[in-house]
Amino acid sequence: MLTFTEENYLKAIYRLSDGGSKAVLTNEIAEIMSTKAASVTDMVKKLSVKNLIGYEKYYGVTITREGMAEALMVIRKHRLWETFLVEKLNFSWDEVHDVAEQLEHIQSGLLIEKLDEFLGFPTSDPHGHPIPDRNGKIQEVRQHPLSESPLNKKRFVRSVTDGSPSFLQYLSKIGIYIGAGIVILEKVEFDGSVEILIDGKKKVFISRDAAQNLLVTD
Amino acid sequence: MLTFTEENYLKAIYRLSDGGSKAVLTNEIAEIMSTKAASVTDMVKKLSVKNLIGYEKYYGVTITREGMAEALMVIRKHRLWETFLVEKLNFSWDEVHDVAEQLEHIQSGLLIEKLDEFLGFPTSDPHGHPIPDRNGKIQEVRQHPLSESPLNKKRFVRSVTDGSPSFLQYLSKIGIYIGAGIVILEKVEFDGSVEILIDGKKKVFISRDAAQNLLVTD
DNA sequence: ATAAAAGTTTAGACCGGTCTAAAAAATATT
DNA sequence: AATATTTTTTAGACCGGTCTAAACTTTTAT
């Protein structure tokens, strides 16, 4: 049984390692956990004793199969709860993150299976992120940033890279949501911004940053 | 903002003080919290600094208005979550307690208000216990132990004093649930057991203990 | 009324998680 | 290759919550 904190470290390491494919540096972890490098070193030692990560001094951290399984379960819980909050309790997609950060640590296998069923076994959360199944399997969909799409081809918004409330609120305001159909009408060479058509109705300009943060599929 | 632990102490003190009406001893708290008297003394000092309880050495603890408000909010959350688990996720009433013990500490006013609405503003939980409203008001219903009811008068099961899984499972097995109609057919002088008729259909004998733990209304 | 028993508090320690300051290793610069 | 800079680790401390053992009150028994 992992502590709240251990789960959060594992989640962070999983994210930073691109799903287990590369080593992670102490300072990177400290950064996204808003803590100090010294604290990370301490925790990393504990996690490696438990075989959840591999740790080599001055080199970095790699996540083990076990650690990955744990991280995926936390992510599964987080995304199921976000789905619940949005679909059943009518939260808006920018309000759910902090609450889900707490709910993801509730310890009960039964609870999460029942919740999954109650939600109809969803495969992605309100931000378009895939929900791992009970075995930790993620249904991968190849997504690319909108900024890399060609002109005049219809794409569908699948997820956002940066899920900060302000970005999400901005998206809602201009009419972009998960599933929206988008066509790039023009790319502005000067600043990388693009003019897009949303659902065949609304034309707006969005910045290069915004276009890079929107992930789409064909 | 209270910690997980502080909330649990307040809840225990609230319970032991009969809703704030009497002083509570250190050892009583230690007992129901499964901790040691020394630990209780420590925590009790902290809570009294925060004005959540009054504390007098060697005498005991009294809960303040503020402390009571906090305790009632935790109880509100606990009971709303229990209701959610049973009504929406199909938990049985003996499975919900441990999970609700965790969920009751999630910090989000918005969440609990939305949950309340989602559940249709229930006034009692699956064990028949009243759910405090957002202001901490409890809708009191005068309940008495089934053991004190007269013969041949129909009573309705409202709640259970002891909500242990084994007792709840026993009740389910013999067909007793919150809301069930019960008539006492006979009281056995010898051991205090009673013969009852459940919903006009099923006759069973239950022990004095069981009859004392079932609270009913007219 | 005095001693014994029971209940409560203090003192000091430990654990998980965090921090700062200083030491050590790795990397970059010249 | 030697030095400066950055990154990482260690050492030692603190906080919240817990514990044991010892000291102190209060209550009970004689």
Image: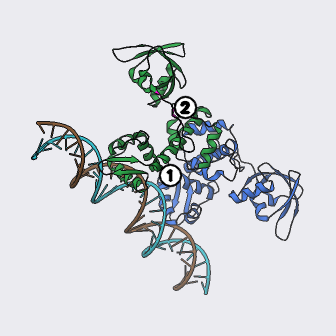
Chain colours: A green, B blue, C brown, D cyan
Give the residue type at disc 1: Asn
Q: Is residue B183 above or below residue A104?
A: below
> Helix or strand or loop: what does disc 1 sit on?
loop
Our reading of the magenta stretch's main secondary structure is loop
Left or right: residue A174 compared with residue C20:
right
Task: Tell me where the magenta segment starts and ends, as one range.
Answer: A128-143
Category of crowding for the residue at label 1, using alpha-carbon neighbours closer than 10 angstroms: few (below 14), some (14–19), many (at least 20): some
Q: Is residue A66 above or below residue B135?
A: below
Checking the image for residue B51, the label placed there is 1
Badge 2 crowding class, 10 Å Cα cut-off, few under 14, some 14 to 19, many 20 or more, is many
Asked if residue A133 is among those painted magenta in the image, a careful observer would answer yes
Residue D24, horizontal then vertical, whole percent: 45, 73
The residue mark sitting in front, 1 or 2, is 2
From this view, report whether residue A47 is shown above or below residue A118: below
Q: Residue at x 80, y 58 (%)?
A: B146
The image shows residue B185 at horizontal and vertical percentages of: 89, 59
Question: Which one is in front, A77 or A39?
Answer: A77
Mark 1–mark 2 contact, CB under 8 Å? no
The percent position of residue B115, horizontal first and vertical second, equals 62, 38
Look at the numbered disc 2 and give the secondary structure of its residue: loop
